[in-house]
Amino acid sequence: MRPGKLPADWLKRHAFSHLGLRRHDVLVHAGIGEDCAVIAFGDEVCVLTTDPITGAAQRIGWYAVHVGCNDLAACGARPVGVLVTLLGSERETEDSLAAIMADVHAAAVELGIEVLGGHTEVTPDLPQPIVVVTALGRAPRSQYVTSAGARPGDALLLTKSAGLEGTAILAADLATRLAGVVAADVLARARSFIARLSVVPEGLAAAAAGAHALHDATEGGVVGAVAELAEASAVGVELWAEAVPVADETRSLCAALGVDPLRLISSGALLIAAEDGAALVAHLASQGVAATVVGRVLRAEAGRWLVTPAGRAPLAAPERDELWRVLEQA
């Protein structure tokens, strides 16, 4: 099988049919487009998620903590801590593994959370280290948000811009290939996108403002996030390709590598479904977060569409993220 997420049809046939006993205190269960479990604890809920970092070669501890906490924020939950599993390859040194943990610590300090524990080992046959983070957060029981709440008539908003995480990874991991093709100052700015990965501020702000649904745009990029939100909410959608913000640095790298920025891993960009898109854009701007209306939610029977200058095409989650395709060619 090729690297990347397993397809939704495999999950439906082989994963979601093997989920143990369904418990009454689990409020949000496993499903397409849902990155978090939500468990009832009195007046609050505990929100849990887990994610590996497998596509990046540098700063993987930093990525892992932020990606995990982004999933919590996309549920309206405030992060509390992370459990970290660090699997090192046999080629690693003590110093290289220590550098990963230093990045874990730095990201945790930035987010105000604790590293609660985890597991470390050297694992045979790994080509590079892998970090897996399980993140835990909390929210009032009346205020958590899921990917399943989008309603026909809602506006779709995207914070920041498409392809943020992919841009940072490509600029760092393919620096040699891109040197002389993309200007050095553009590559430097692209690598700095790693500092934009957190969606915790906008996730908490959007949830408090009454957003109907939130979804972190990770693997599969903006197109994948819209498709997953539509699947979770059982609705139709229109994504307006020309409205999706794409940073100049992302455009430059994507042009050089033949990458579609709308299908490039986009941690740092939060997809939001809300009744009044303009009002939420203004509210997020007052919190220092840029957001753009990029589409709308339709009735299920209206279908799911990507709207481009060439017309309307069916919208579906990409079979794989653009990052994997490019890294295989490197």
Image (cartoon, rainbow, N blue to C red):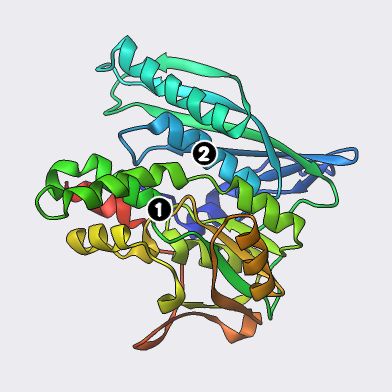
Q: Is residue 158 visible?
A: yes
The residue positioned 57% from the left and 57% from the top of the image is 289
Q: Amino acid at mark 2?
A: His
The residue positioned 42% from the left and 76% from the top of the image is 241
**Residue at the limit of the structure toward the bottom, as seen here:** 311
**Residue at the limit of the structure toward the top, as seen here:** 94
- Give 167 or 186, whichever is nearer the viewer: 186
Rendered location of residue 293, percent (x, y): 56, 73
What label does residue 66 carry, if any? 2
The residue positioned 35% from the left and 44% from the top of the image is 192
Q: Is residue 94 above or below residue 256?
A: above
Residue density around tag 1, few if under 14, some if 14–19, many if 20 or more, within 10 Å = many
Residue density around tag 2, few if under 14, some if 14–19, many if 20 or more, within 10 Å = many
Q: Earlier in the sequence, mark 2 or mark 1?
A: 2
Rendered location of residue 222, percent (x, y): 46, 63
What label does residue 164 carry, if any? 1
The total number of labels drawn is 2
